[in-house]
Every structure is written in structure tokens, then in C-alpha cells.
Amino acid sequence: MKKLLFSVVAFCIFFTACKNDNAAVSNAPQAGLQLVAEANPAWQYENLRLYPIVADAALLEGQANLSGLKTLAEGMTTPGFRITEQKQFGRSDDRTYNLLTVQNKSQDTIFILSGDVVTGGKQDRVIAQDQIVMPGTVRNMDVFCVEQGRWSSNDTLSTPAKQKLYAFSGYYSVASPKVRQAVQRTGSQQEVWAAVASVTKANGATSATSTYAALETANEQKNKRDAYLRFFEGKLDTEPQVVGMVAVCGDQILGVDIFGNTDLFRREYTSLLHGYVTEAATAQCQQKAAESAVRNAFGKVAALANPDAKTTEGAGKFVLGTHWVHLFSK
């Protein structure tokens, strides 16, 4: 499978473009995707409701090769795959906040999602764009800082040699919708920092370095988020062809994420959910969203599954050759 995927990718160009509740299904014309809109108590906890998105058999068969992709969370524990501060070619020691170097000496193909947060290095970062990292490659990638008050290694368990590399030691999660939108829509470091500050403050997650990962600090708000996560764990597994979801907090559409393969979605699900819960658990959104609004949000993103569909200001897509890997709202 890996060899087949590699042969397909070798010739590809990668880019990021960067009724009532009884009505169970909404169709996206020619896209092979459906929104499951039936009322189901298993898909709602407090003010957060998930709407599963399923794919038909033809779409899944046509994108079967995508099951060979590893997520970044999996890549971070794969021998031979490493993310470090940008390698300097020459004697320059400039602070390069918005570039990291990714090296993949493994035999796996790694899919990195815009919004993925990595911890370590000189500052924690969030990935700017969806991308593929092929086996045997090394290159730089765009990122934004999600930690303002640090510029030195904090990995006290590493050897001095590893600390000197400023390698990233961990994967945190997919960032909250506010942070992802700042990354995808504005491309502004100041906007990203403002979004991080807003989310961490709302969750009572203060830290000396103002890092997004301070959300792991034990407090009442974290206990509340953990309750959401426990409730939703595995809940979309009841839909065998699920490839994505619309996340809705009361009457607010938090986001839409659709993947080209069921297996890839299931492995990204927990990380995506973490970001959605981070915002929902502190949001004052109680009124129920109109189904028409949910269908509209789904339709705008799902329409990008059509090969000739153009990306819009509010929706994007990442394509691998002739296959779309990820459709999302911005």
C-alpha cells in the first residue's frame, strides 16, 4: 500500500486551497457526501452537537489509497520522523519563528493538518497549512507561534545533544476554531497570539509563557472539557461510512471537517474534537441552530469534493494528485 501511495504521489502537485430533525439526510450534488441530520442524543452533549458526514461506496473506493497516510500525532512517535526549529544553512542564527524543519527518514507518508499543535523546540507552534511529508524527504514548513514567552529548550529530559537540535517532543491536538481561523484566514502572527490568549483566558489556562498547551493545566474548566471528550469518545462509530462532521455549539457553526477516507477521519477525530470542545465548553451558545444553517455550512464545504469546484473565502481543500484529502471551513 505504501509503495502504491508513493508511486501516485511522486507525480503529483500538492497544494492547499489552503426541514426539521426528522429529515435524516442532505445531499451534496455529485460529491458522494451526505449530512446525517437526524436527531440522536448520542451526538449532543450540553451545548455541543456533532452532525456526522458520510460518504457513498463509490467515493470511498476511489480514495482507498488514502488509508496509507499517517497523522501527525502518529508521525511524532514514528522512528525517523522529526520536527525541529528551522535548520540554518550557514552561520546565521536568526530567530525564525514562522518556519520549522520536518525530516522524514521513515517509510511512512505523513499527513499534517493545518491547526495541528506541536510542543517543544524553542516555542510551541501551530501548523499553517495542510501538507504531505513523503518518506526520505526534508524541508521547511510554515507555522505560527502559540507560545510567546519562551525561546529556549524546555525539554529537561533530553540529552544536551538533543536539546541543541531544538526538536519538538510532542503533539498536543488540533487547535480551537478561533486559532485555526486566525491561521487560515488572516495569516497574521498577532491575530494568532490574540486568539490563543482569548481561548486560554476563557479556560483559565494561564502560564508564564502564554502557551496554548497550558490548557492541560488541571482546573475546573479542564474537568469540564474532559467530560465533553469522554461523552463523545467513539460516538460517530455508529456510522460505518463516516468521513467527517459539522460541529455546532448552540446556534454557532464551529466548523466543518471532511476527510477523503473513513480511517483517516477516525484517527483525526479525537484531536479535532479537542479543539471544538475547547471552545464549546466556554461559549455562551444555548439556542439551537437552524437546520438550514447547518446544511448550508455542510454544502459549502462538501461541494469542494467535485473536481471542478473552486475554493472560496470560507472553505478550503487539500488535494493529493487526483484525490482530495481534506475539505474544511475556514
Image (tube, grey):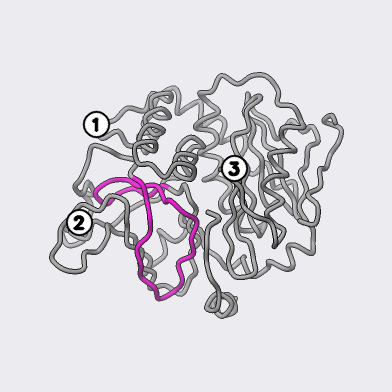
Local SS, label 3: loop
Instruction: Decide whether residue 77 is among the magenta residues.
Output: no
In the image, residue 63 sits, relative to residue 327, either above or below, namely: below
Q: CA distance from mark 3 to mark 2?
A: 40 Å
Front tag of 3 and 2: 3
Give yes or no for contact between labels 3 and 2 (Cβ–Cβ under 8 Å). Answer: no
Q: Earlier in the sequence, mark 1 or mark 2?
A: 2
Front tag of 3 and 1: 3
Question: Residue 116's spot in the image, x, y percent?
Answer: 45, 49
Q: Amino acid at mark 3?
A: Gly
Q: Residues within 10 Å of mark 1 (few under 14, many from 20)?
A: few
Tell me if I can see residue 240 in this picture. Answer: no
Task: Residue under label 3, please give it.
Answer: 314
Task: Residue under label 1, please give it.
Answer: 208
Left or right of 221? Residue 263 is: right
Task: Residue under label 2, please give it.
Answer: 163
